[in-house]
Image (cartoon, coloured by chain):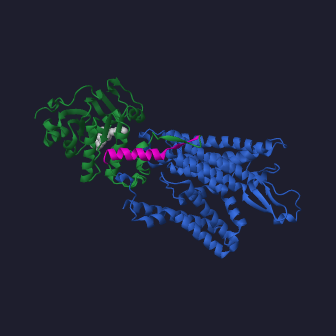
Chain colours: A blue, B green
Amino acid sequence: MSENTRASGQGRSVLDFVGAFWAWIFLLLLVMIFAIANPVFLSPFNLQNILANMAILTIIALGQTFVIISGGIDLSAGWVMGMVSVVAALTINTMPPGAPLWIVLTVALLIGAVAALIAGLVNGLLIARLNVPPFIATLGMFGIARGVAFLLSGGMPIPVRTEGLGRVGNGYLFYFHPTAGWSFLTPPVGLAQADMRQLMGVIPNAVIFMLILLFVAHIVLSRSRFGLHTYAVGGNKEAALRAGIPVSRTLIAVYMTSAMCAAFAGVLYGTRFTNGAANAGEALLLDSIAAVVIGGASLFGGAGSVIGTLIGALIIAVLSNGLVILNINPFWQFIAVGVVIIIAVLIDQARERLIRA
Amino acid sequence: MTATTELTSVNPAAQGQPIIRLTNVTKRFGGLTAVSDVSMEIYPGEVVALAGDNGAGKSTLIKMISGVYKPDEGHIYLADREITMASPMEARSLGIETIYQDLALCENLDATVNIFLGREPMKRMFGVFKQVDRRHMLTESKTVLDRLDITIPNLRRPIRQMSGGQRQAVAIARAVYWNAKLVIMDEPTAALGVPEQRKVHELVKTLKSQRVPVIIISHNLQDIFAVADRIIVMRRGQKVGDVMASEVDGDDLVGLMVGAGEA
Ligand SMILES: Nc1ncnc2c1ncn2[C@@H]1O[C@H](COP(=O)(O)OP(=O)(O)OP(=O)(O)O)[C@@H](O)[C@H]1O
Ligand SMILES: [Mg+2]
């Protein structure tokens, strides 16, 4: 047996551990603090709420994860999401009233995805083929998607009144009622209005949707050739090129992945808020980058993971929910997230120094 | 010594077909002629050092062999067949493996991935989805590293956390694994300490013993005399010397490199 099979030294393992898992530890501390301050925080209803409310952010952040690992950034994701929500709303409103909901949604998603993928393709071509820096290319697309979204919507949110749409985004996989028992996807029929109050939803649909996308993204990033190439391009573009990796194609695929995630987020927004709004994702862009960075990705590229991004999104979601529950002015959330991003970067730098030492 | 261009001799080890042959190769960057009318041949099992001052055109010359640049003039023949390479990948598929001056490794990835980068083995997952076969990469990497007697404590750690010598070793292992017909090394010892330089010298000799020819670029006379059979000297884009290492000393080489005896 050769020495190449030997495990690494144990010396710095404790510091390594803290460095690698500080975000988990931080999340745990946050949960404990909020739970002690107000037990309502840990109620199943509130926990499900946190998860359902973070779904849209998490989905945008998934796309951003690919982009940041590849060494870029996608500033257009938020407005592409808004554009998709507008396109989807307009599409749904042109469908015949009696059309089955799943067909309506599929068509809306397809047309929204086309709009998003055009934006992603343009981003990718500019960055991969014309060597425009990602910051500039996606800032341009930020403006374009924003303009298109507002032009299409006329500057106002577009309400969608399709029957049952809101229940897709806000509904649950199961419902439980003390007398009527369990039911699947729809609340038990024939419940009186007064009884509705005891009805409990179990596992929000939005969470299911988020989990499916998390799973797919995780597998693609950690197991597929495209995922490996994304890391390689972000780590050393020149080396990737010389090793024969199709760098341009990888980068274009990365920006289209981000756009596709924005499309999923835009359609999910439509089903949760039953409208399409140009500025639906405006506030989500910074949070999505924050989630990825808190999750251990480096803005220089080459590092990051889907699990990390999930932890980052959880921290942001728990912070905003906890502050509301504690009756603290929600604007504090911006400050808290800002501080956490800076801590994340500082810890990352400290780890680098430790490793190189 | 007199005129530098007369200092050429025939390599007794040079037998049979050359592995690679360059005829009158020229490369220009705008108005600058980085490589001018260079011809050379490399034979199986020989180690050829490419010497020359900074900016002499050494890296540019080997980048034409490894498919990074296309020559503006001249031809390159691999085992008697003319090759026109459009990309580094094409050169690699022809068996030309290059270890670049600025190490062409992805420092964020581990040694096994770097050895297989661009040629990842795949296996099927759930019958449909194709995933990178990391286990295969690990076992194969161990085999090739053992064969070269290279020790890397933890193959799953990113290259970034390895020493310069270990990184160089990974780059060489990559070349060996893919059955290189020709290995090119650009300043392989530039950033290394003395023990690590020795290790690289040993690796070059291992390659030689396996009849793989090596072109090694170096400023370092110790490097050159430790491993080279033959020395090609470049100055200002031109080939000004092609000599057996056993027939010259350091002073001769420096003279060729800086052009002493002319002017
Ligand atoms: N991509 C490029 N564009 C323009 N000029 C270049 C390029 N690459 C090299 N040159 C120029 O060509 C000449 C030869 O460069 P090259 O890198 O081949 O030299 P070298 O012998 O490898 O030098 P060193 O020992 O410093 O590595 C230099 O004058 C260099 O500035
Ligand atoms: Mg050079």
Tell me if residue A308 comes above or below residue A130 in the rendering. Answer: below
Which residue ends up furthest to the front in the rendered image? Answer: A1
Quadrant of res A13: bottom left
Residue occupying the point 23% across, 41% down: B53
Quadrant of res A40: bottom right
Q: Residue B103's spot in the image, x, y percent?
A: 36, 46
> Which of the two residues, A182 or B72, is positioned nearer the viewer here?
A182
Taking the magenta stretch, the answer to whether it contains residue B144 is: yes
> Which of the two residues, B202 or B215, is positioned nearer the viewer here?
B202
> Which of the two residues, A80 or B139, is positioned nearer the viewer here?
B139
Q: Residue B112's spot in the image, x, y percent?
A: 42, 47
Main SS type for the magenta part?
Answer: helix
Tell me if I can see residue A23 in this picture. Answer: yes
Q: Residue A142's spot in the image, x, y percent?
A: 61, 49
Q: Is residue A270 left or right of residue B146?
A: right
Q: Which residues are magenta?
A: B128-149
> Which of the two residues, B29 or A298, is positioned nearer the viewer here?
A298
Q: Quadrant of the C terminus of chain A?
A: bottom left
Which residue ends up furthest to the left in the rendered image? Answer: B1
Residue occupying the point 69% across, 50% down: A266
Tell me if I can see residue B57 in this picture. Answer: no
Residue occupying the point 42% across, 31% down: B86
